[in-house]
Image: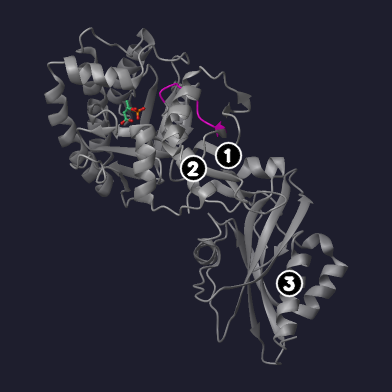
C-alpha cells in the first residue's frame, strides 16, 4: 500500500512519487478547488518523489531536505495555507519533507509534496481514506498532486461536478518496463511566474485557450490508447505536441508568458535531429525551462552519451529495485528507497525468506535449498533458503514471494504461511551491508516438485535434511548465506512445535 506506515500516532508519514504529465493539465474551471477543464495523463517517477512526516505541534515548522524553511518561503506559505484546511484537527504542525527530485525545476515537486503530505495526515489521524478521497484532498493542494497517489500511468479525470467529487486520479492498468524518462535540468532557479498564476492568465486572456481545451481532450484519448497498446511512437508524438501546444497557449497570454530559455529551445531542436537520425526519442516540458525526454530502454545508452547530464528514471523497472525501509526501534514502515543504496548504507529494511520443506521416503523432514548464482550482487555462490527477496510492502509480501519463487525456481507456490521473523545485520562479502527484518514464509510440499531454475539467479539446488544442514553449517559456515542460521532456528521452532522434527 503506497506510503502507509504504522508509526505511533504522534507522527504520521507518507511517501508519494513525483509525476510527469504526458498530456498536460493547463487551466482551471475552479481556481479554489483546482478543478481542470480537461483530463490529463501522467507517468509516476518510480522511487523519485517525496517522503513527508507530520506532527502536531504548538508552532508551525516546515523542513525541506533537512533545512528549516523561512516562514515566508513559497514552500512554507503554500504548506501553511493547505494545512489551514485541517485546522479542526490541529492549529499547528511540524512538517518534514525529503524529496529526491530536483526542487522547483519543473519536476512536479509540488505534486509529490502534497500527495505525501495528505498520506502523512491520513496516517497521523488514521482516517484510512480511499485512494479517491486521498487524491481529491491532494488536488486541493496542487492539481497535479491528485495523480501522485499511484505508481505507473495515472489519468486525472476532469469530472463535471461543481464540488469536484468526480475529479481525481485513477491508475491506468498498464505496465511498460522499457519506458524511460530522462530529466534534463536547464535552469534550477525558481520560475518567475508560478503555474497557478500562469494558468489563470492563460484562461482569462489567451484567445487560443478554447483550442487548447479541444486539443488536450483529444490528446488524452490518444495517449490513453497508446499506453494500452504500448504504441510508443504515438505516445511520444502526442505527448511532445501536447507540451508544445501548452507552451504556445501560455505564450499567447496577455501579456505573454514564456517558460523556455534559449537552452530549452536548443534541446527541442536537438531532439528533433536525433529523431531524424532514427532514434525514437520525444520530449515533454512542464511549466518551466527544463525538459524531460521520453524513450525506451534500447536507446538509453546512446541518449546518455548524447546528454551526459541527463538523469534517467525507468518508472516501472526502477520500482522493482525499491525496498521498504523500517524504523530501527518500532520496525514500522518509514519509506521506500533504492535497493542498492539501502544495502550500501545498511538501513533496516523488509525482506522475506521462502522455505519449502517435504517429508522424504524415510519420514525425515527435508528443506529445499538453492545455491545463489555467481552473478548475484551479494552472497554469490552460497547455499541458502529456497528463495528470498524484498517485498513491495508487508501487505503484498505473500504475493511477492510467490512471484519470486516462480521467477527464480519456476515453482508455483500457493499456500505460504509466515512462521516467524528475525532481524539480522551482516557485513557481506561484496562490501554491502545486510540489515533486514526477515519474514520466514513456509510451506510443506506434498508430492513431486519439478523445478525450472533461472540460471542467472540460481546455480544449483538440493533437498537436505535439517539435521544434515545443521552439521554442514557447523563444518563449513562460509558456504552458506549469513542469514541461514537464524532462519533455521525459526524453522526448527515451527517444525518441532508441529512434531515434524
Ligand atoms: O499542479 P500544478 O498547479 O503545479 O500545475 C501543474 C501543471 C503542469 O505541470 C504544467 C502540467 C501537469 O499536468 O502536470
Marked residue nearer the N-terminal end (2 or 1): 1
Residue 94, image x, y percentages: 58, 33
Q: Quadrant of the C terminus?
A: bottom right
Tag 2–tag 1 contact (CB < 8 Å): yes
Which residue, given by chain and number where applicable, does mark 2 sit on? Answer: 89
In reply to whether residue 390 is colored magenta, the answer given is no
Q: Residue at x 48, y 38 (%)?
A: 117
Q: Is residue 308 left or right of residue 429?
A: left
Which residue, given by chain and number where applicable, does mark 3 sit on? Answer: 490
> Residue 56 shows which numbered tag?
1
Q: CA distance from mark 2 to mark 1?
A: 9 Å
In reply to whether residue 97 is colored magenta, the answer given is yes
Q: Residue at x 45, y 22 (%)?
A: 104
Mark 3 is surrounded, within 10 Å at the Cα level, by few (under 14), some (14 to 19) or many (20 or more) other residues, namely some
> Residue 206 shows which numbered tag?
none
- Asked whether 431 or 172 is in front, the reply is 172
Q: Is residue 267 left or right of residue 313?
A: left
Q: CA distance from mark 1 to mark 3?
A: 40 Å
Disc 1, SS: strand
- Asked whether 101 or 205 is in front, the reply is 205
Marked residue nearer the N-terminal end (3 or 2): 2
Mark 2 is surrounded, within 10 Å at the Cα level, by few (under 14), some (14 to 19) or many (20 or more) other residues, namely few
Amino acid at each position: 500500500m503506497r506510503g502507509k506506515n504504522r508509526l505511533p500516532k504522534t507522527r504520521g508519514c507518507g511517501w508519494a512519487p513525483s509525476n510527469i504529465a504526458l498530456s498536460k493539465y493547463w487551466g482551471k474551471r475552479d481556481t479554489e478547488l483546482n478543478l481542470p477543464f480537461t483530463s490529463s495523463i501522467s507517468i509516476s517517477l518510480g522511487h523519485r518523489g517525496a517522503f513527508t512526516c507530520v506532527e502536531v505541534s504548538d508552532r508551525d515548522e516546515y523542513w525541506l531536505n533537512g533545512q528549516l524553511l523561512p516562514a515566508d518561503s513559497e514552500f512554507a506559505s503554500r504548506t501553511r495555507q493547505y494545512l489551514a484546511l485541517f485546522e479542526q484537527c490541529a492549529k499547528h504542525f511540524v512538517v518534514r519533507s525529503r524529496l529526491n527530485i530536483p526542487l522547483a525545476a519543473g519536476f512536479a515537486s509540488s505534486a509529490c509534496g502534497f500527495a505525501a503530505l495528505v498520506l502523512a495526515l491520513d496516517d497521523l489521524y488514521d482516517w484510512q481514506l480511499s485512494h479517491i478521497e486521498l487524491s481529491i484532498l491532494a488536488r486541493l493542494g496542487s492539481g497535479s498532486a491528485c495523480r501522485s497517489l499511484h505508481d505507473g500511468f495515472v489519468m486525472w479525470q476532469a469530472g463535471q461536478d461543481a464540488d469536484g467529487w468526480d475529479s481525481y486520479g485513477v491508475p491506468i492498468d498498464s505496465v511498460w518496463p522499457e519506458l524511460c524518462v530522462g530529466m534534463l535540468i536547464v535552469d534550477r532557479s525558481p520560475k518567475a511566474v508560478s503555474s497557478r498564476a500562469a494558468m489563470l492568465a492563460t484562461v482569462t486572456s489567451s484567445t487560443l485557450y478554447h483550442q487548447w481545451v479541444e486539443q488536450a481532450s483529444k490528446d488524452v484519448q490518444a495517449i490513453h490508447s497508446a499506453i494500452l497498446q504500448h504504441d510508443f511512437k504515438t505516445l511520444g508524438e502526442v505527448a511532445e505536441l501536447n507540451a508544445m501546444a501548452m507552451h504556445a497557449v501560455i505564450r499567447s497570454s496577455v501579456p505573454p508568458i514564456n517558460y523556455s530559455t534559449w537552452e530549452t529551445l536548443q534541446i527541442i531542436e536537438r531532439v528533433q535531429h536525433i529523431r531524424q537520425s532514427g532514434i525514437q526519442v520525444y520530449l515533454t516540458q512542464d511549466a518551466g525551462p527544463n525538459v524531460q525526454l521520453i524513450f525506451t530502454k534500447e536507446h538509453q545508452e546512446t541518449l546518455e552519451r548524447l546528454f551526459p547530464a541527463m538523469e534517467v528514471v525507468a518508472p516501472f523497472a526502477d520500482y522493482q529495485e525499491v525496498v521498504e525501509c523500517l524504523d530501527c526501534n518500532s520496525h514500522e514502515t518509514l519509506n521506500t528507497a533504492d535497493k542498492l543504496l539501502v544495502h550500501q548504507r545498511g538501513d533496516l529494511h523488509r525482506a522475506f525468506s521462502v522455505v519449502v520443506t517435504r517429508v522424504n521416503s524415510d519420514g525425515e523432514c527435508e528443506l529445499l535449498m538453492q545455491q545463489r548464482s555467481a552473478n548475484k550482487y551479494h552472497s554469490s555462490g552460497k547455499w541458502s533458503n529456497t528463495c528470498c527477496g524484498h517485498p513491495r510492502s508487508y501487505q503484498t509480501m505473500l504475493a511477492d514471494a510467490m512471484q519470486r519463487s516462480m521467477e527464480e525456481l519456476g515453482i508455483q507456490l500457493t499456500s505460504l504461511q509466515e512462521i516467524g521473523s528475525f532481524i539480522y545485520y551482516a557485513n557481506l562479502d561484496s562490501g554491502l551491508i545486510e540489515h533486514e527484518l526477515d519474514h520466514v514464509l513456509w510451506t510443506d510440499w506434498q508430492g513431486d516438485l519439478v523445478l525450472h531454475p533461472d540460471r542467472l539467479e540460481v546455480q544449483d539446488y538440493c533437498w537436505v535434511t535439517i539435521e544434515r544442514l545443521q552439521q554442514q553449517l557447523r563444518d563449513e559456515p562460509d558456504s552458506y548465506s549469513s542469514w541461514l542460521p537464524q532462519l533455521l532456528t525459526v524453522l526448527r521452532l515451527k517444525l518441532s512445535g508441529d512434531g515434524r522434527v
